Image (cartoon, rainbow, N blue to C red):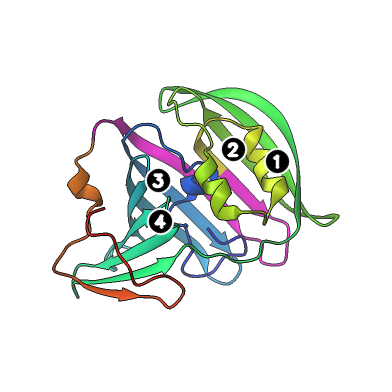
Amino acid sequence: MTWNGGKRVFLCSCTVVFWCSQVLADMSYTIQMQIENKQYGLQSVTQRCKTNEQFLLTETQYSAEEGAIVQLTDMKRGVIYSIDHKEQRITMSPIPDEELPELDFNAEKMENSTIRGFQCQGYRIQEFRGTVPSATMEVWVTDDLDMPFGSLWKDLLKDKSKALKKLRDNMDGFPLRYTRRSLLEDKTQVQMEVMDIELSDLPEEIFTLPETYTLHVAEEVSSDTPEEL
């Protein structure tokens, strides 16, 4: 997810990964999201996700007129496979390793809430860039799904945001609802809610790349690709 908006909102492959990347059980779920900013107005995004302890498969639909964007994220290797079924082509690229702005956060607990049948703890968060308030956020997390914030995503962030890691350490659980309102010039607003949660064993074939597709490897990653995912 980009903090400052844009027509193609980067979901990394999924907003939930922003909060939680170590999954202790196979799970399928759908994310409904609305993004609004001054430049592009309101966008509605639907993302269908399947995940296990290593992989995250997403199908992201930005509009009914466009085909879904399919991505397979290998969280242990730190790479994303973008899959074009029409062209039978796979593009392998690293999870973006951009420098994060210097952020700080103040968080306070809110009232509890029941979302999709799960008990959730709410948090209100004030984000700062340096000493300047940059955004307000609200997030509701549940510990009923046995999916804590994991070390994999922290490893991907490396040392780029110690404040962000500390924030997640203090908010253990799986996020079911998330809102963010930018206080900067772009005025981007994001609303996200997880829907249709299903915990069940998923076949390994779901997370396997099509063998007959052409593979294009970005320069930033090794050309070695696993024979079996």
Which image quadrant is residue 186 in? bottom right
Span highlighted in magenta in the image: 179-201
Q: Residue at x 59, y 64 (%)?
A: 37
Is 216 drawn above or below residue 41 in the view shown?
below
Can you give x and y, in whole percent of width and height, for residue 157 in the image?
Answer: 59, 54
Q: Residue at x 73, y 57 (%)?
A: 183
Q: Is residue 158 visible?
A: yes
Instruction: Evaluate if marks 1 and 3 touch, with contact meaning CB atoms under 8 Å apart.
Output: no
Q: Alpha carbon of mark 1 to alpha carbon of mark 3: how far? A: 21 Å
Sequence-first tag of 4 and 3: 3
Observer-nearest of 186 and 205: 205
In front: label 4 or label 2:
2
Mark 1 vs 2: CB contact within 8 A: yes
Residue that mark 2 sits on: 139
Question: What numbered label is drawn on residue 125?
Answer: 1
Q: Residue at x 18, y 48 (%)?
A: 205
Q: Viewed as shown, does residue 144 lie left or right of 55?
A: right
Query: Where does label 3 land, which residue?
Result: 31
